[in-house]
């Protein structure tokens, strides 16, 4: 078998991988910077605003006063779903069903998990107590607040109001039967506290209905209604202690926000009425049709409105009735990260595809013959099996990554998902996950380098019965060990995983990129009479540890 067809095959694979990497680089440069898939959660009192940037990996939470900027953010593991806030505390509800209370006078304090570990539809603080809206299927499992240990009965209601007690959650009152979940999202039922009374809002067709809770009887009194054609979302709020309503209207040209203020005793009174109000928003780059309404709260005589752009941008826009807002639009999550971290994320996002292209070009130019060849080996040695290579890597890497996650306070499972999304979908993870992966890679590099310099194997290789050798079957020298581990630092970079997996599976000798450049092999011991210990006659082999250079190899 001649070498030329082999080289042509190697070149074809490398060129295909280079083309893929070039397209990825162009896409990354065109996009500018990838953001983790996230949501913005807001809540407010009259003088305090809480903003959270939540992803599957972590949640950053910050607060500000009416005259002060955002403070240093707190970080939590997992995705935040809802918040219920007062002037002195915030109760956080996570997608996992966990509940954490944050007070100014103390650190985060875990509270009782949500029923069935599902986040609430909405939550508020009234009279110092925390109330939540949940589906009746979850409320049935709770004790009744007014009947001791008896089970709570929601009747025919779909939605129920529950309260957080010292011993856990308890059923408080079912909502009227006509109240439904509205499909969730911006049409879900909402809660508002006015003068100590709890008001519930829900959607019936294109009508927004309000009812006020009578605490002594736990009954609801239906109040004002508002019809909004093409209703796509809404949020009740207080602006300067006056009830207001923001509604998103779907039109032929896109989404339009409409604002209403309450005229009368309150939304829970039938004789009250919603009056249209002129809303002035802080500027959103991209035009009105480029964003969609998510949520809104009242804060410091103005409104804070969460908008999502069609391109993934997220921001909090400020607004006033009848006059321009006093504050500019606040981008999320950039507002939580110092400029240095933002620049680091941008460098990683844009520089990674370029680095992949450079490495693949070097492989094609200098080491393409070694992808297809297995050097002549002693009869007692053979290339390690695929499962041995993978098992050894997992034995070495997983404990390091878990310890690093614990040290940095990052959820290991969520961080692994973030890194996997980075490798497969090209979605750059959060700064916290980037830091975790950087430390994990550095510790993995140092551990592997020291172990292979001392014993030519790591703990994982010892367990599976393999060792690092040079191409002649002898012990690799320190230069080769150093080079293969320096390249390992590139190989653990998630965007390298897919192209390098192709090289690892397609090439002969089950060699990773570091082995190809360092001229090393990971070998297992075999009996001398095993046929696999010698390359087959139709495989291109070398007779020396360092085969002759040919066809562009330097």
Image (cartoon, rainbow, N blue to C red):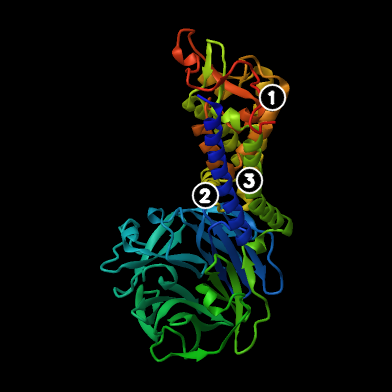
For the residue carrying disc 3, how many other residues have a C-alpha within 10 Å: few (<14), some (14-19), or many (20+)?
Answer: many
**Residue at image x 50%, y 17%?**
535
What is the distance, in whole Å, between disc 3 and disc 2 at their CAs? 20 Å
In screen coordinates, is 173 left or right of 279? Answer: left
Instruction: From the viewer's side, name the closer residue of 487 and 464.
Output: 487
* Image quadrant where one finds the C terminus: top right
- Image x and y of residue 458, in percent: 60, 23
Instruction: From the viewer's side, name the closer residue of 248 and 117.
Output: 248
- Image x and y of residue 268, in percent: 41, 83
Residue linked to disc 3: 357
Residue 464 shows in this picture = yes
Residue linked to disc 1: 480
Quarter where residue 33 is shown: bottom right
**Residue at image x 66%, y 33%?**
552
**Residue at image x 32%, y 63%?**
136
What is the distance, in whole Å, between disc 2 and disc 1 at their CAs? 32 Å
Which of the two marks, 2 or 1, is nearer to us in this view?
1
Residue linked to disc 2: 421
Instruction: From the viewer's side, name the closer residue of 54 and 426.
Output: 426
N-term mark: 3 or 2: 3
């Amino acid at each position: 078998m001649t070498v030329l067809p082999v080289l042509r095959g190697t070149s074809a694979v490398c060129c295909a991988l280079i083309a893929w990497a070039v397209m990825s680089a162009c896409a990354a440069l065109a996009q500018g910077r990838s953001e983790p898939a996230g949501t913005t959660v807001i809540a407010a009192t009259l003088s305090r605003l809480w903003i959270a940037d939540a992803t599957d990996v972590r949640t950053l939470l910050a607060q500000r006063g009416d005259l002060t900027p955002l403070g240093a953010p707190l970080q939590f593991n997992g995705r935040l779903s809802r918040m219920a806030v007062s002037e002195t505390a915030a109760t956080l509800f996570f997608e996992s069903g966990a509940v954490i209370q944050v007070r100014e006078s103390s650190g985060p304090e875990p509270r009782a998990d949500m029923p069935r570990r599902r986040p609430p539809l909405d939550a508020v603080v009234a009279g110092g107590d925390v109330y939540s809206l949940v589906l009746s299927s979850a409320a049935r499992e709770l004790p009744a607040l007014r009947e001791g240990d008896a089970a709570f009965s929601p009747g025919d209601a779909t939605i129920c109001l529950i309260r957080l007690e010292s011993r856990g959650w308890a059923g408080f009152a079912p909502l009227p039967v006509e109240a439904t979940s509205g499909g969730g999202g911006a049409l879900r039922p909402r809660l508002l506290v006015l003068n100590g009374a709890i008001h519930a809002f829900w959607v019936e067709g294109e009508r927004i209905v309000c009812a006020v809770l009578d605490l002594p009887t736990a009954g609801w009194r239906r109040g004002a209604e508002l019809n909004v054609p093409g209703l796509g979302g809404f949020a009740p709020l207080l602006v300067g202690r006056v009830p207001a309503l923001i509604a998103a209207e779907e039109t032929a040209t896109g989404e339009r926000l409409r604002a209403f203020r309450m005229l009368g005793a309150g939304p829970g009174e039938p004789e009250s009425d919603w009056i249209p109000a002129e809303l002035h928003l802080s500027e959103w780059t991209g035009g009105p049709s480029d964003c969609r309404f998510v949520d809104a709260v009242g804060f410091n005589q103005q409104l804070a409105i969460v908008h999502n752009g069609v391109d993934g941008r997220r921001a909090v826009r400020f607004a006033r009735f009848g006059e321009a807002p006093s504050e500019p639009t606040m981008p999320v999550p950039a507002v939580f990260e110092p400029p240095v971290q933002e620049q680091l994320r941008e460098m990683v996002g844009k520089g990674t595809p370029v680095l992949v292209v450079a490495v693949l070009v070097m492989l094609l130019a200098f080491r393409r013959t070694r992808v297809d060849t297995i050097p002549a080996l002693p009869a007692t040695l053979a290339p390690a099996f695929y499962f041995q290579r993978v098992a050894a890597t997992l034995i070495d890497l997983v404990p390091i990554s878990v310890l690093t996650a614990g040290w940095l306070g990052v959820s290991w499972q969520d961080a692994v998902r973030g890194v996997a999304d980075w490798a497969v979908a090209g979605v750059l993870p959060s700064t916290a996950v980037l830091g975790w992966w950087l430390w994990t890679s550095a510790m993995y590099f140092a551990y592997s380098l020291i172990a292979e310099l001392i014993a030519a194997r790591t703990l994982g290789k010892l367990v599976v019965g393999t060792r690092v050798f040079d191409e002649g079957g002898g012990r690799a020298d320190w230069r080769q060990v150093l080079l293969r581990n320096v390249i390992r630092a590139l190989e653990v970079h998630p965007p390298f995983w897919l192209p390098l997996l192709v090289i690892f599976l397609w090439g002969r000798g089950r060699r990773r990129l570091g082995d190809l450049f360092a001229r090393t092999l990971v070998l297992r011991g075999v009996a001398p009479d095993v046929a696999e210990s010698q390359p087959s006659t139709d495989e291109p082999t070398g007779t020396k540890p360092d085969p002759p250079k040919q066809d562009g190899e330097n």
